[in-house]
Amino acid sequence: MKNQSRGWLKIFGFLLLVICVPQAHAAAPIVAAASSIKFALTEIAAGFEAETGQALKLTFGSSGSITHQIEQGAPFELFLAADENSITRLATQGFSQDGGRVYASGRVGLFVPHAVQYQADPQMAGLRSALQQGQIKRFTIANPAHAPYGRAARAALKSAGLWQEIQPFLALGENASQATQFAASGATQGGIIPLALARTPEIETRGQFVLFPTDVHADEPLHQRMLLLKNAGKVARDFYAYLQQPVAQQILARYGFDLPAKENP
């Protein structure tokens, strides 16, 4: 009888383990974010987890793609977009707990690999000359259809009068991170990429980078807003608050993001 009782206890213990382990994993909220903030957010999340003991799951992509996934029922609890339009769209449809909050503003610039012989300059005179001399075979930006950084890049090229000329050579990245990899790998003869990604050690040693003034893409501002989704639990809400604290803001600033005013709604 004792052996039988022990056997049932073992079975009960095993079943309890099977039931509890998936629940423990499921407790970590999924935070979806624009790929432009990948390195900064990974560092911020690590600090949050170390400080609070609360785990997070991070997933990255273009703001447009993530917005579509949320509309299709993706179980994200917090979304950090690279723009405001994506957040407004979701809030209008009732996917959010509130209207969200601007957490940073992004910047873009021209990246030129070391192997390519033209100068990176804010007016893109070097790029214009390289185009005229047939040096450009491929040039990358994030896809404007999905990525706010792609739309900002397109606006900058239009401002320089190069949009029509460069279109036949465009290699579009699915998001800002992929466009950055295209530019830094030498697969293209340059690209327009986020400052936050250009500042990472992996990228900054591979070429020249020059930052554009924000007025060259004034009609496509990179005010990046975050949103608590309707199903957000305590851990996601805690991380949302943590992102507004000085420790997180300092990390964002170090990666080149402009910080919002404290009074920002």
Image: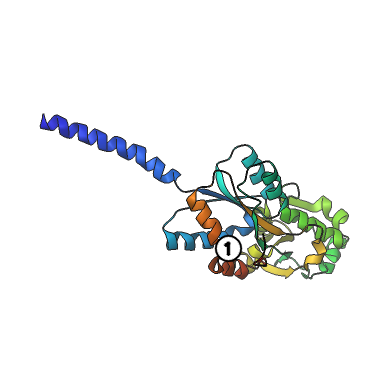
Position of residue 58 measured from the top left corner of the image (x, y, whole percent): 53, 52
Q: Can residue 38 be seen from the camera position used here?
A: yes
Nearest the eye: 234 or 149: 234
Residue ID for mark 1: 244
For label 1, the SS is loop
Nearest the eye: 170 or 4: 4
Which image quarter: residue 156?
A: bottom right
Say above or below: 160 vs 30.
Answer: below
Q: Count how many numbered circles sit on residues in the image.
A: 1
Q: Quadrant of the N terminus?
A: top left
Position of residue 97 measured from the top left corner of the image (x, y, whole percent): 60, 47
Position of residue 21 measured from the top left corner of the image (x, y, whole percent): 37, 42
Nearest the eye: 141 or 58: 58
Q: Quadrant of the C terminus?
A: bottom right
Q: 245 left or right of 9?
A: right
Which residue is located at x 69 percent, y 46 percent?
Answer: 64
Amino acid tagged 1: Gln
Which image quarter: residue 75?
A: top right
Q: Name, please, the residue furthest toward the left.
A: 1
Which residue is located at x 78 percent, y 57 percent?
Answer: 220
Q: Residues within 10 Å of mark 1 (few under 14, many from 20)?
A: some
Which residue is located at x 60 percent, y 70 percent?
Answer: 254
Which residue is located at x 44 percent, y 55 percent?
Answer: 54
- The way the protein has been coloured in the rendering is rainbow
Q: 137 left or right of 255?
A: right
Q: 155 left or right of 1?
A: right
